Image (spheres, grey):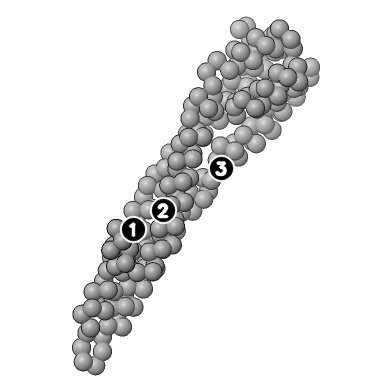
Amino acid sequence: MLSIIQAAGWPIWPLILCSVLALAIIGERLWSLRQNVVLPKNMLNHAMQAYRQNGATPQLLSQLAATAPLGQILAAGLSQEKNSPAVMREAIEEAGHVVSLELERFLTSLGTIAAISPLLGLFGTVIGMIEIFGSQGPQGSNPLALAQGISIALYNTAFGLVVAVPSMVFYRYFRAKVDALMVEMQMQAVKLVELVHGERSA
């Protein structure tokens, strides 16, 4: 691996940095966007049971908000339980925007890495081409400089694609997953409003 980095020259280092950042973001998002972390099973049922027993107490609201992103949305709705369904839905919508931003954290950075990695690879290719042209002299070409230029050009192009493709795949995957999670949370929040105001039976 070290020999490849040496052959690729200094333009490879920005790509290595991008690859490390991409791996860190992918690992963090895989851990944070797990279904049982964002949407714990039966959370709405447990929240309604506690609400029917003691009402929307500060303890219940703080416990819900600290448990999971879904809990933040449910807590926002229950905090307005004495108001009309429209007010509850507005509070839920506002909380949903905050939760959505939390779930999309670092995704813009991952998308940026996916977009710029091929360009960084292209930059390395240009540097390699400059090395190739620089190897030409009055006495002919310098084989060592020519080989170095070819290595820089090819390795950077390849590594740029190696970084960009998985980054783009995971970026699209995470965006779709966040959208699906938000739809599910919205459905549960609507059910909460209907349960609190007697529009739906448990």
Residue 114 is left or right of residue 153, and the answer is right
Which of marks 1 and 2 precedes in the sequence? 2
* Mark 3 nearby-residue class (10 Å; few <14, some 14–19, many ≥20): some
Residue beneath label 3, please?
Answer: 105
Residue 180 is left or right of residue 98, and the answer is left
- Kindly tell me whether residue 189 is visible in this rendering: yes
Residue 19 has which mark?
A: 2
Which three-letter amino acid code belongs to the residue tagged 1? Phe
The x, y position of residue 191, in whole percent, is 61, 17
> Hey, which residue is sitting farthest front in the picture?
2
Residue beneath label 1, please?
Answer: 159
Q: Residue at x 49, y 39 (%)?
A: 29
Q: Quadrant of residue 79?
A: top right
Dot 3 falls on a residue whose secondary structure is: loop
Dot 2 falls on a residue whose secondary structure is: helix
CB contact under 8 Å: marks 2 and 3: no
